[in-house]
Image (cartoon, helix red, strand yellow):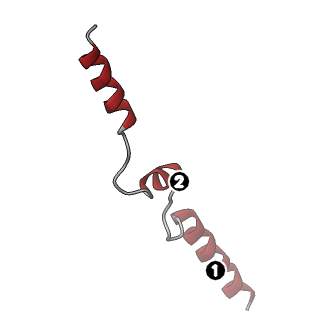
């Protein structure tokens, strides 16, 4: 293998860097929905019905 190919391979491996430094943090973090899921909505509705029945 010629030295030019070896040097080019080293440069490609060494220059990998995201333009935005927060990209790596964003990929590592697991984001979810900010709104409550349907299960929580059904539970809240069921609790409201029970509360109405008791009053």
Sequence-first disc among 1 and 2: 2
Q: Is residue 3 left or right of residue 42?
A: left
Q: Secondary structure at mark 1?
A: helix
Residue 46 versus residue 37 in the image, above or below: below
Viewer-proximal residue, 35 or 21? 21
Where is the C terminus found, in terms of image quarters?
bottom right
| Outermost right residue | 54
For the residue pair 30 and 40, the one nearer the viewer reads as 30
Question: Mark 2: few, some, or many residues within 10 Å (few <14, many ≥20)?
Answer: few
> Residue drawn at (50%, 71%), measured in percent from left and top?
35
* Residue at the (39%, 35%) spot, across then down: 14
The residue sitting at 52% across, 49% down in the picture is 28
- The dot on residue 49 is 1
Estimate the spatial distance between the alpha carbons at disc 1 and disc 2, rounded to whole Å: 35 Å
Q: Which mark is residue 30?
A: 2
Q: Quadrant of residue 12?
A: top left
Image depth: mark 1 or mark 2 in front: 2
Residue 21 position, x and y percent, is 43, 56
The image quadrant that residue 53 belongs to is bottom right
Q: Is residue 49 left or right of residue 8?
A: right
Question: Does residue 53 lie above or below 27 as drawn?
Answer: below
Q: Secondary structure at mark 2?
A: loop
- Residue at the (64%, 80%) spot, across then down: 49
Q: Nearer the viewer, residue 8 or 31?
A: 8
- Residue at the top extreme? 1
């Amino acid at each position: 293998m010629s030295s030019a190919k070896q040097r080019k391979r080293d440069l490609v491996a060494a220059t990998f860097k995201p333009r935005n430094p927060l990209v790596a943090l964003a990929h590592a973090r697991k984001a979810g929905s900010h709104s409550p899921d349907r299960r929580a909505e059904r539970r809240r509705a069921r609790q409201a019905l029970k509360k109405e029945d008791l009053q």
